[in-house]
Amino acid sequence: MIKVAPSLLSADFANLQKDIERAQAADWLHVDVMDGMFVSNISIGVPVVKSVRKITDKFLDVHLMIEKPSRYIEAFANAGADLISIHLEADMPPGIQDALRIMDEKKVKKGIVLRPITSAEAVLPYIKDIDLILVMTVEPGFGGQAFMKDQLPKIKQIRKYIDEFNPNCHLEVDGGVDANTAPLVVEAGADVLVAGNAVYGSDDVEKAIEFFKNVGQK
Ligand code: DX5
Ligand code: ZN
């Protein structure tokens, strides 16, 4: 079965507890952290993760869209993140390695993220040592954008790398995932789907989550 990670970016921040309860059927919760530098938008940070941690046992999948993420790994881990993913474009390789090392020390799961411009091969130096690869199918920064179909070959290539080098690594896809695009993404090899608008923009949140969980089931 596919894991679904509703993106809290599309939730109502004034009613976050209610929106988290509405997503009870989900496996994970996806938390989008933006610094206004790595991406133009600013979203939420450490205190929100800390508060969310107090009201749910769900696996917190924290997607950092921030420059030089090694500066904040410890804080997000202490706030209760279960997995932290960092963009390969957000620092030079030694900075990325530093961030991953701190995740190890803090015993949180490790993810790397690729912007649409970044090629599949970029995962190779890290793949054996990580728990998740996140492929962006929109330019990071905002929810509700159109899915970039040209990322599908990259998802397929990364699935091949994962099968060869680290079969336990998750392959997550984020951006424009909806009822039309989810089957393409799962067919290409993803096993975790992030969905913002398609979950929180739906009249029936539970039904939307169940739909995504069962994508690809015969
Ligand atoms: C975009 C974020 C996404 C976003 C997805 O920068 O990383 O997680 O919330 O939203 P949808 O599913 O609406 O494209
Ligand atoms: Zn995200």
Image (cartoon, helix red, strand yellow):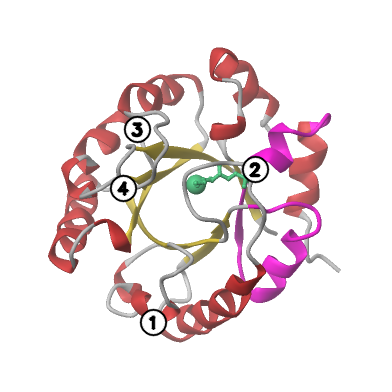
Q: Residues within 10 Å of mark 4 (few under 14, many from 20)?
A: many
Question: Of 160 and 180, which appears nearest the observer?
Answer: 180
**Foreground label between 3 and 2:** 2
Q: Quadrant of the N terminus?
A: bottom right
Residue 25 visible here: no
Question: Of 82 and 133, which appears nearest the observer?
Answer: 133
Amino acid found under the numbered disc labelled 3 = Gly
Task: Identify the residue under disc 2.
Answer: 144
Check residue 32 in the rendering and tell me which mark sits there, or answer none: none
Task: Identify the residue under disc 4.
Answer: 108
At a point 73% along the width and 69% down the height, the residue shown is 184
Query: Percent x, y for residue 35?
Result: 32, 37
- The residues bearing labels 1 and 3 have C-alpha atoms spaced at a distance of 31 Å
**Foreground label between 2 and 4:** 2
- The residues bearing labels 2 and 4 have C-alpha atoms spaced at a distance of 29 Å
Q: Residue furthest front?
A: 40
Query: Percent x, y for residue 183?
Result: 76, 65
Amino acid found under the numbered disc labelled 1 = Glu
Looking at marks 4 and 1 on the same chain, the residue that comes earlier in the sequence is marked by 4
Query: Percent x, y for residue 77?
Result: 28, 38
Q: Quadrant of the C terminus?
A: bottom right
**Could you tell whether 181 is left or right of 52 in the image?**
right
Amino acid found under the numbered disc labelled 2 = Gly
At a point 66% along the width and 75% down the height, the residue shown is 188
- The residues bearing labels 4 and 3 have C-alpha atoms spaced at a distance of 9 Å
Task: Identify the residue under disc 3.
Answer: 80
Q: Is mark 2 within 8 Å of ligand 1?
A: yes
As drawn, 130 above or below 40: below
**Foreground label between 1 and 2:** 2
> Residue 174 sits in which quadrant?
bottom right
